[in-house]
Amino acid sequence: MIATILLQAGGGFGIQQMLPLVLIIVVFYFFMIRPQVKKQKDQKKYVEELKKGDKVITTAGIHGKIVDVAETTFLVETEGGHKIRFEKSAISLEASKALNTPPAVAK
């Protein structure tokens, strides 16, 4: 009886009914998930390449210079000679790159 009602209502679950859902998932992947994964990979690569003497800015906005590199942390010297230990994940990729990029010369 239920099968008869479903057949009269237009038949099962066809490709036309599934297509909008698949398109939404594809769009979501390319506009939301993929860029976030790329950003995380770039952040990880940047932090792994940091070395003693590099100037950095933390996600909290603290400016300093790396004095020591440990397995999961950096010892950062701030202005005034104070030293603070930060997790490597606390280093801001965008802010630190902007700090280390020389300003463009106007012609």
Image (cartoon, rainbow, N blue to C red):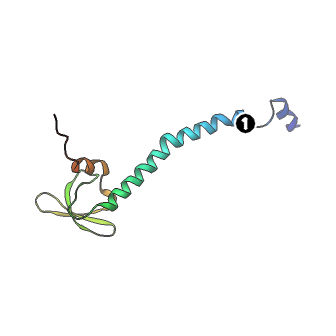
Left-right relation of 18 to 11: left
Image quadrant in which the C terminus is located: top left
Give coordinates of residue 60: x percent, y percent.
26, 52
Give coordinates of residue 63: x percent, y percent.
20, 53
**Depth check: 70 or 41 in front?**
41
Q: Is residue 51 above or below residue 58?
A: below
Left-right relation of 7 to 89: right
**Depth check: 66 or 101 in front?**
101
The residue identified by callout 1 is: 15
Left-right relation of 62 to 71: left
State the residue at coordinates (31%, 51%): 93
Q: Secondary structure at mark 1?
A: helix
Q: Quadrant of residue 6?
A: top right
State the residue at coordinates (36%, 54%): 43
Give coordinates of residue 52: x percent, y percent.
22, 65
Give the residue type that dot 1 points to. Ile
